[in-house]
Amino acid sequence: MRCGTAEGERARRAARRAARGSWRAGAGQAPRAGLLAHALAACPLPSGRRRRPSAAEQGPMASGTERGAQAAGGPAACYWELSRFPAVTRAALGATAGGRTFLLYTECSRPDLPRRRLLRFSRHYSLRHTGSGGLAVSRAALSAEIHNQLLSQDSPTGQYRAVLSRCPQGHELLEVWGSGGRSHSVDLTALGKHGEVYTEGPFACLAWSRSEKRLLYVAEKSRPKPRPPCPWDVLGAARPAEEDEDEEGERFVYHEDWGEALGTRSVPVLCALDLESSSLSVLEGVPEHLSPGQALWSPDDRGVVFVGWWHEPFRLGLSACSNRRSGIFHLDLAGGRCELLSAECGAACSPRLSPDGRRLLYLQGGLGGPHRQCLQLRVLTWQTRRSVTVLDVVQEPTEAFAGLYAETLPLRCWAADSRRAVLGTPQRSRTDLLLVDTEAATVANLTAGLPEGCWELLTLQWDLLVATCSAPHRPPSLLAAVLPPAGRELPLRWVPVEDAPTVPGVTWKTLTIRPPCSGQSPTTHGTQTFEALLLSPPESAAPHPLVVCPHGGPHAVFDARWRPSMAALCRLGFAVLLVNYRGSLGFGQAGISSLLARVGERDVADTQLAVEQALRSEPLDPRRLALLAGSHGAFIALHLLAREPERYQACALRSPVSNLPALLGTSDIPDWRYVSLGLPYSFERVPRAEEVAAMLLRSPIAQAARVRTPVLLCVGARDRRVSPTQALELYRVLRARGVPVRLLWYPAGGHALAGVETEADVFGNCARWLLRHLGQPRQDGPGRHSP
């Protein structure tokens, strides 16, 4: 709540300055235990009350200035407190002599809010077999910050580590480190054989050969630097004799890229570094119509296996789109022959070679349709080149198995027997680890029934599993387990390596929602149940205001993982409902397909149905409801605001979809505009008047005149998926009609509004918006533009 006096405004400014100073002074240190309590006490609860910290919470050393600084933080201080828990991004195992002790290396990251950057560091552990499948864990070294590193990968034996880094001068260096220190260092930029190395996204890889003498990676194809423009305006200026006529007029030629988050990725090439000769070569033989990525060496090191994406006649957005035409290829380096190993017309990815080199595991899905879908797991016998389906697409989920929905397989997912594999995938509103027997074509859930709702495999080497687990009220913990022989895997004995505490004041549960039957003969997927995750503050403060969050995609899922921003909302006094409407991943392919042609109808109705059930069964305040969503979730939220103008008291949206036909020429995935309405898509397709009209009828902008709820809009100026002009158009419409509206424009932001500073700012603004409009009675009549 705002203070109306000049004295109060001066006090707030002084407190904010003190808070910023205390953040800088405490850089790199863990926040004090009482910080969150003071932040919560300062933040008005949605009921308008303030929580008074106890004497123990205030602490003996907290001065009045410190208390004022901490109080000024509000949602920002709460977010800072809960975002300090690190995420483990990579793990690698190395065996010692005797094979009973293993060294575990992990890479971690967490936001460093005072410095506005991502802090990356390493941790080292020792794992020792104790007999009967047990493990003893100890910390082997102190944590160390990782500087300038872009990629790293350990060799098959664990004796070497390849590290790609960028030096302060901007050059990319590829180095090899071993027990004796650095053995190789190659300045890739100085060699000039290719452009920037791909370090993330669907193309990126860094692969060792089995002999550990060569490295394989993907980089942008080298493009000739444009010549400076000729001085045509100087009378009598002579054209340089060496100027190539073919280069004339090429300076401003448009070069396609792969869309959102891949704007600098256009023409990838495979690159191999020979460590013995320190020679670098760009591999030839990849067909011109393919863009290669996800490469690895063939079993004999004489060829390369890679994923090739077709890019003709033009490129469509690839990020979060597993439905693009792609295949698994083998490139024979000696003969230059490129062979397709997977289906001719499919979408294949994630090739993983078994330890014995005899079998190749990969994922395969269908072309077109939903951007994310249920996938097949296939295995190819290397010698015969024959492939079979191990796990097929699941139309209707069962208790035992709901299908595969992972975008990629873990880099090391094979057991030592080269028969079993472990992978993670959404299973309804959880992400579980599955054990697959590739010969018997059976699957077992290794984590079903465990209290943590999200499990992710980091590595599987020498039958040692290293994974993370988290839940909405518990940050990620690092665990390890020994994989027993076939047939005796369950239950696994997980051993904590780095345990994270449960966050107090946050509880969660899964709600199951059954839609009512509709129509004369409802189909199975028409009445399929769906789920929602409910995060709640302590019941002592009930009834709680409710923040409703439908996910984006629309073919995505809210799994039961740790999300600092959602936990922070709970700590601020809100209950949060994460809705997995029909069409979400993890509930079978039939459910995904059921949303096609029903976008803007079924997803909207399901979200509202979840809200109604939560209000009936939980201690929630029906007079204090808000919407918080992004992308397609914002599309759903806008429809809800138009359908029930008096129901929701506040709305905060990120990268909102509001005008479907306007996206045909501005989005990197124009195909989705047709597919979402049940219309076929082809590259040659030109929009028809009746199709554009149908898209407009499904667009929230067409119903914007009915919106009365205060709306906050957050957009990235570089969003390639949903143009920021969608939000700008909506902003102008709402402002012209007197609806309270605010637009935040992030110049360097993309669709996800990612980045340490951006994410913190978006959360802070959204939380303050919700507190402002749910913490006071709703005012009727004309609105006003918020500052």
Image: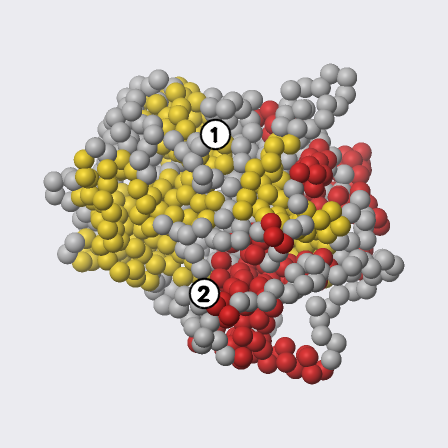
Q: Amino acid at mark 2?
A: Ala
Residue at 47%, 29% (x, y): give it: 404
Query: Of helix, strand and loop, which one carries label 1?
Result: loop
Whether residue 334 is visible to the viewer of this picture, yes or no, is no
Image coords of residue 149 (percent x, y) = 35, 58
* Residue 52 falls in image quadrant: bottom right
Q: Image check: 319 left or right of 109?
A: right
Which residue was labeled with disc 2? 33
Vertical side of 572 occupied by 349: above or below: above
Residue nearer the viewer, 608 or 372: 608
Residue nearer the viewer, 609 or 416: 609
Residue, far left: 98
Vertical side of 569 occupied by 588: above or below: above
User: Mark number for residue 404?
Assistant: 1
Q: Image check: 379 left or right of 619?
A: left
Q: Earlier in the sequence, mark 1 or mark 2?
A: 2
Say whether marks 1 and 2 touch (CB < 8 Å).
Answer: no
Q: Amino acid at mark 1?
A: Leu
Vertical side of 23 occupied by 671: above or below: above
Disc 1 crowd, CA 10 A, few/some/many (<14, 14-19, 20+):
many
